[in-house]
Image (cartoon, coloured by chain):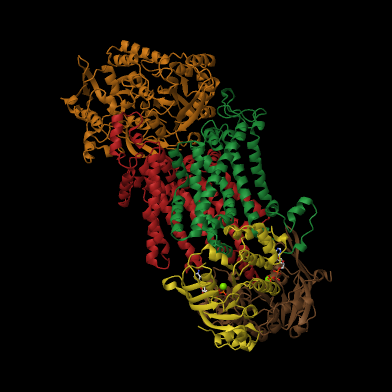
Amino acid sequence: MIDVSELNVTFGQGRSELRAVQDVSFRIEAGESFGLVGESGSGKSTVLRAISRLTQDWTGSIKIAGAELEHRRDRKTTRRMQMVFQDPYGSLHPRHTINDILMEPLEIHRMDRREARVLTALEDVGLGIEMRFRYPYQISGGQRQRIAIARALILEPEILLLDEPTSALDVSVQAEILNLLKRIQRERGLTYLMVSHDLAVVAHMCERVAVMNRGRFAEVLTTEQLRSGTPKQDYTRQLLTASGRYDRDVAKSFVSFD
Amino acid sequence: MTPLLSVKDLRVTFETHRGPVKAVRGVSFDLGRERLGIVGESGSGKSQTGRALLRLSAGNGRVSADKMEFDGIDLMTASERKMRGIRGARISMIMQDPRYSLNPVLRVGDQIAEAFLVHSSASRREARAQALQMLKTVQIREPEKVYQMYPHQVSGGMGQRVMIAMMLIPNPDIIIADEPTSALDVTVQMQVLALLDDMVRERGMGLILISHDLNLVASFCDRVLVMYAGRVMEVIEAGRLNEAKHPYTRGLLNCVPELDEPQDMLPVLQRDPAWVTAGD
Amino acid sequence: MTETSTAAATGSSLSLQRPLKAVANVLLTLVLTFIGLTAITFTIGRVMPTDPVLAIIGDRAPQEAYDRVYLEMGLDRPIYEQYGRYLNELAHGDLGTSIMTSQPVLEDIKRFFPATLELATIATLMGVLIGVPMGVWAAVNQGKFIDHAVRVLGLIGYSVPVFWLGMVALLIFYGNLGWVAGPGRLDVYLDGIVETQTGFILIDAALAGEWDIFRNAISHLILPASILGAFALAYIARMTRSFMLDQLNQEYILTARVKGVSEPAVIWRHAFRNVLVQLITIIGLTYASLLEGSVLTETVFSWPGIGQYITTSLFNADMNAVLGGTVVVGTCFVGINMLSDLLYKLVDPRARS
Amino acid sequence: MSDSNAPKANGGLRAWLMSPAPQSKFQARCQRSYLSWLAFRSNPIAMTGLVIILGLILMAIFAPVLTATNGLEPDLANRLQPFSAEHWLGTDQLGRDIYDRIIWGSRITLYIVGLVSVIVVPIGLAIGTIAGYLGGWVDNVLMRITDIFLAFPRLILALALVAALGPGLENAVLAIALTTWSPYARIARAEVLTIRNAEFILAAQAQGASTFRILRRHVVPICLSSVIVRLTLDMAGIILTAAGLGFLGLGAQPPLPEWGAMISTGRQLLLDQWWVPTVPGIAIFVVSLGFCLLGDGLRDALDPKNTDT
Amino acid sequence: APPKDTFVMAKDFADIITLDPAEVFEFSGGEVIANIYDRVMMFEAEDLKTLVGGVAESWDISEDGKTITFTIRPDMTFHSGNPVTAEDVVYSLRRVIKLGKTPSFIFSQFGWTPENVDELVVVDGDKAKITITEEFSPALVLNALSAGIASVVDMKEVMAHEVDGDLGYGWLKTNSAGSGAFVLKAWKANELVTLEANPNYRHGAPGVKRVIIRHVPEPSAQRLLIEKGDIDLARNLTPDQIEGISTNADLKVQADPKGALIYMAANSSDPILGSPKVVEALRYLVDYEGMANSFLQGQFQVHQAAWPSGLWGSYDETPFSLDVDKAKALLAEAGYPDGFEVAIDTLTDSPYPDIAQSVQATLAQAGIKATITTAEGKTLWPMYRAQKHQLILAQWSPDYVDPHSNLDAFAHNPDNRPEAKLTGVLAWRNAWADDNMNAMVVEARNEPDLGKREALYQEIQKGLQSNSPYAIMFQQTEQAVLRKEVEGYVSGATFDLIFYRNITK
Ligand SMILES: Nc1ncnc2c1ncn2[C@@H]1O[C@H](COP(=O)(O)OP(=O)(O)OP(=O)(O)O)[C@@H](O)[C@H]1O
Ligand SMILES: Nc1ncnc2c1ncn2[C@@H]1O[C@H](COP(=O)(O)OP(=O)(O)OP(=O)(O)O)[C@@H](O)[C@H]1O
Ligand SMILES: [Mg+2]
Ligand SMILES: [Mg+2]
């Protein structure tokens, strides 16, 4: 479904040049969930942004269902591929009601039966219709993230790009959102590309996981490999230990990888 | 051993246009020279409890308590002057997000030195030396260089360490750490915790660690206080967390995905309205 | 316009880190601003119904005289050609000659501008020295009586028509009480005693050791300066208050309090240092806007300042003078802006890197 | 959001306004406004401002009822009367009733204020948001132009424009507007820069929204409130500039009772018939103050820190 | 307060743009040069009614009235110390023609041109001889030689400052080279003019050492200044302010009739205003008395003829007063029983807007809806000169003391075509011409007999009251407010008949 090869993203020029993503290649099959993990600043979001073309200065090739992706956003691919952002507090317009937020993509893509679709979308993410005319500030973080997901789903996309969809939420709400995402994927056969820095979350959601470090793929593992603690790279191993429980001696042994 | 800090029936209420918001309603606990964890979901009143201890609640907040005593001092009635002497010097608090919690126009080193100077009559040179020493203690490699930096120049992990250095420099008896690691990467998170751990061990302080990550708190602290909607649901030895009985605690524990055991769907927390009113 | 846009576009890619490029950028901004300012002024001058020829020859002149002067002034040429010629002369430092005063515009400006500068500087100083503490005081006591009192007091300075206030103040403090001297910069019979060196009477008098004249000048200056000062004060106080409130709500203030820092230190060392960053721009803008000369205050106080100069010139279609005045005021504006940018960088470490 | 803590609403309308689950867009809007109003209402200064402005509007609407004359016709036999039962605020140099002129003048003030807002806000918003959102050379060109207008001596530019367009109220308003928009563009741009990379903008982009749509639906509403607040704060300045133009004889033409012009023509009488210039001076002061107070209050009320609790 | 030997006067003198006597045509500038330069012919401070020789001691008029020979006063010196000679006189007059600035038309109407002036204005031994080529009454020529352009400048001094053949124009604009009572010390535009006494003046040293004229545009400021004693003389107080200071024992008011007239003119090319009946109706729709007795009190008198009262040749009848019924009847006759809409243009400064509003109100009584537009002079005049007005409310004052000065402008329009562009002529500006009037003006101009001349002028003025585009309303009286110790301020009918030299305090 998604076929990325030799993806490079560079920000800035000259001395302030920053190669945020370097020679990244991977393939995701239709219906698969693919995870991206790595510490902060390793370039995870940048990969997603390139695919969704929120960043336009990338080189390499990205294919969606076999079709080469242009640099400019076009309405058709936008509709097939939607994104959910990390911060539910920042990704909803503070002055739009939930209804406005859900209506907007329908208007942009000139879809019919808007009323009905909005109601269905709310139901899909498990929110009552009483939410429809509230403002974002009137609902909780978890509910906001559901709205963000509903907004992405309302266009009936095939691919969902998820950029740390739960890292701003507390554990109890995180569980609800993860369950929701899993259920939807099962019902609709969506393809997920999911970014997180929480190994457990990625392992819970995805079949395969890519570990990123400083813009490069350190390695790609299956979830089993991750669980069994048999990564090839030291970097991944350290990430794994850090994700576990607190251990004083282990923490002191951490090194930095360049 | 008498506890360092003793709190009984602490309540914090905020006046808003929609009416009063009871953020903390009847929290009681004692703290010795130990690591106490406070956990609970977002909005459960963890931070407000911490702030109330320092009498730094927001302007629209009202604090009341049957007892809020630190080392024989009644924190409820102490004069503002006295409180200033306590803040930082005896009880200090590591703030949540170093990006916003450091003054952007002052050098980080000077901010650390200031914390020292406020409570001692030392000279600037001494304060500077102390601050450098402290930076070294929190394992900053080039303290001289970092001393001269401004907050926007330091990374999140470094900022958090600066924050810790700043709060530790007057050598307080109690330190409240409000989610000191939630903005950090897992590896850095561990390192910061290790640092706090060292401090508690070496200096014999009391530590309150506020977090919403039950597993983390369980593995780090001695005792855990579980909060929900401004109330304490349960206090439990960290080691025996798995034996927790309260459904809320159990719920929180269960809903975290585990790396080592695959689950299909995660159990979600079923909130019981009775928890809110229990004991009123 | 194409010239402007391409130049502006290159301006954007310049990074401020390189001094040479930064200087080039500054110069470019300056030049573009000038071209814009003069072009607009020039166009206005040409579309105005006021006739510059009549300003010279008077209303009763016969048509022959009119036609001759019209040609002499080059008004028959296309406007872009006239403009081009003006720019060319400007580039050679020649602002032309004023119709009204029969003097080179540059000479006039040397005479009128210091008068305004003197007034504006003192007014801004008053605004800063009183307005800033007032604003801080109000913010610290937000919602209390003091806050409201300071705000309303400040707003009064902001809402009273300055010409009316000027007249009333003149009536009371000069007419009735006799505490200050009347309209004008100096009692006339003292005029011309000290040699003009800087154009600032205060400085000139001090240099010459003529303390009587110095005192007289102060006594003339105090009223108009206070009135403009009240305006500056109101604005500065209100902005200080609002900036201060923003800062006092920041997390780092809480950090400072957690450290046990005393309240004055929280306010001045922590919050105010941050406010200062924003204040610089505000103060710069206030000063710049006072430098354009307050036509109204200058009218009421018979103050021979640049505002009055430009206005009278405008009414007399003395476009050389208007253009010259605009260029000078524009330069000051741009200059002050740059200066405040520079100061900004000094005060705000974030702007430095 | 701890709705459970909110007091259970009692009144019907209040319940409707406070309901946690609005049933329509309209109700949602009303709720939002109501919350702002609640914050606003608790601010005595802001309320004073509002009362003054409402007073001004009422004065303008009911001018025919409130006055005995149209305030235009000279009555040379009755010149310069002091305050009396017949002429509450005295008469001017042509014997016209000052009270009547002030009342009728409120219409002119409102007209100026309204027209300037209608011109300034769209221009400022358009230029500021386009510059801020598009960035790059567009930003540079637009901001240079803005700078040029900022660098212009304001009253002088206004004077020049009025001189070019010819005296009269409409032209004065136009001139003021053209000299006033630049700071608005600045504010709007600054605001846009802070949200340009906000996730809700990215989200709209990711949905394929056109630039125009994003500007109109997402960017402008965010900037609007700070622009409006600034506008009310500037209103005093606008009124005073208009009065200044009137003072210099370039605003409303005689015999229109424009307050600035009234001061201007009455100013020679300050020493003996002080009320002739003073009454319009106070009128200008009160209204300017009203707008200032209102603006200050609005800023507090629209500040999310104060409402979104 | 100013020292004893310094006289300070406050005035609005924004109009000064030059102090070169060959160019000065503004009120304030005219007043200043009147105190710096002696003219060929003059009215003296001691007797403002009689034309006497200034620099000229005596003169001879030839038989045909076309040549006048002036004998120059002996022993007169310029401020520089140079003696005043016939050469200076001839130079000064030629200079006016050669520079060709606006007021030069006063001389060029005699037939002088830059080409022929060297032959027509010559030195004849120690005398100066002038010859005119046009028909002009010699009385008129002598009157014209008392105008500001007839100021005698110090040729040597001026030529020493000549640049590029400009006849010293660039220098003389801001400096002085005369023989009058005062020397120009400094002119700072819009700030002050300082004059220093000339101790060697032919009438003796002036009463004060220095005269400072201060630019104070605001009348209220002037009032405060004079009440505080910071100035000795305030020139621009309004009637209401004068009334306000009447109780102040330290001040006194000196009223001097001036030649300035306020009139309203109707553009005859306008389809409605072109009707004489309409204009006549307008004359009955002005509340002359009402205004003169209220806001114009003391500073303007009703005057309805085109040459000011109190001067030779004046005509003082005032046949018009506010009469709405009569006006309505006239309008009905003209075909506008319900009135019409019209625009009044006028100046921004007091009292024009007030007069305009009063007129607006009285016009309304006859159903005429007038809108007022006020503008600065520099904006108003171009429109007036381009005949773009409907009604205009403006002022006129004589250029020199001879009825010809006014009547040539009000009544004489030899070519009424728009393209003729006689923009200096009021009649042309209002697109109005009358052959009979034209003939009378020329006849009066050329008439050598004073008695006949006076009668002719009065006839013209009478004619203008019934047949013209004007409604002449008021004549100005200047009310100068002085500190009570000030004596000897002399102010005559025209703007340049103001003398400072006898002032003492
Ligand atoms: N628009 C941009 N301009 C310049 N640098 C950028 C830009 N966006 C991202 N970067 C840089 O690119 C690098 C990768 O950023 P990215 O956001 O992809 O990291 P991430 O792995 O998503 O981190 P996090 O876990 O913190 O979200 C970082 O160093 C970041 O600073
Ligand atoms: N100034 C205030 N006015 C009104 N309500 C407030 C104020 N400050 C906090 N609250 C409310 O108090 C409650 C408790 O807040 P608190 O910050 O203690 O939560 P927390 O447990 O720290 O959550 P988190 O994990 O998100 O930090 C919340 O519902 C919050 O909305
Ligand atoms: Mg990211
Ligand atoms: Mg918290």
Q: Nearer the viewer, residue B58 or C290?
A: B58
**Placement of A220 over or under C165, stated as above or below:** below
Chain D display color: green
Q: Position of residue D166 (x, y in %)?
A: 45, 36
Colour in which chain B is drawn: brown
Q: Quadrant of residue E277?
A: top left
Q: Count the numbered circles shown.
A: 0
Q: Looking at the figure, which quarter contains the N terminus of chain B?
A: bottom right
Image location (x, y in percent) of residue A152: 61, 66
Classify the position of the C terminus of chain B by image quarter: bottom right
Is residue E349 visible in the rendered structure shown here?
Answer: no
Q: Residue furthest left?
A: E125
- Residue occupying image coordinates x 53% and y 58%: D210
What chain is the yellow one? A
| Chain rendered orange | E
D151 shown above or below A125: above
Image location of residue C98, percent across then percent down? 34, 42
Give the colour in which the image draws chain C: red
